[in-house]
Image (spheres, rainbow, N blue to C red):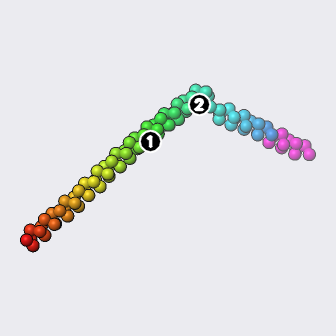
Amino acid sequence: MKVNTQHSIRMLTLAVVSSAFIGLTGCATTGQFEELQTKINAVASDASSAKADAAAANSKASEALRIADEANKRSLATEERLGRAFNKSMYK
């Protein structure tokens, strides 16, 4: 019985010492927390800026696609007119 009690006391002591060690080494200072918060805010700001840049790029890409579609339609219309003119000149 005495051996079990000593063993339990040793385990309890070890647990308390381990907990104290982990607790003391794991605590962050206020300065470290503020530094981390500053870094998080900077990353969030960069992400917002990147999102705005992506939206602007998407808008420009949509405009470029619209212009390209318009140019393609004009090209097809011109090709059709030239084909008609060619046929007219060949069979006149």
Residue 20 occupies which quadrant of the picture? top right
Residue 53 image position (x, y, % from top left):
40, 41
Residue 74 in magenta? no
Asked if the stretch drawn in magenta spans residue 5, the answer is: yes
Q: Residue furthest top?
A: 31
Whichever of callouts 1 and 2 sits on the residue coming sooner in the sequence is 2
Q: Residue at x 23, y 56 (%)?
A: 74
Task: Return the residue found at the far right.
Answer: 1
**64, above or below 16, in the image:** below
Give the quarter of the figure containing the N terminus: top right
Q: Nearer the viewer, mark 1 or mark 2?
A: 1
- Of 42 and 87, nearer the camera is 87
Q: Which residue is mark 2?
A: 33
In the drawing, does residue 85 fall left or right of residue 11? left
Direction from residue 46 to residue 11 in the image, left or right: right
Of residue 84 and residue 26, the one placed in the foreground of this image is 84
- Give the residue at x 13% y 65%: 85
Disc sitting over residue 89 in the figure: none
Q: 80 above or below 12?
A: below
Query: Number of numbered discs present?
Result: 2
Under mark 2, the amino acid is Phe
Identify the secondary structure beneath mark 2: helix
Residue labelled with disc 1: 51
Identify which residue, 50 or 23, lies in the foreground: 50
Residue 33 sits in which quadrant? top right
- At x 79%, y 37%, the residue is 13
Amino acid marked by disc 1: Lys
Q: Which residues are magenta?
A: 1-11
Main SS, magenta region, reads helix
Q: Residue at x 34, y 45 (%)?
A: 60
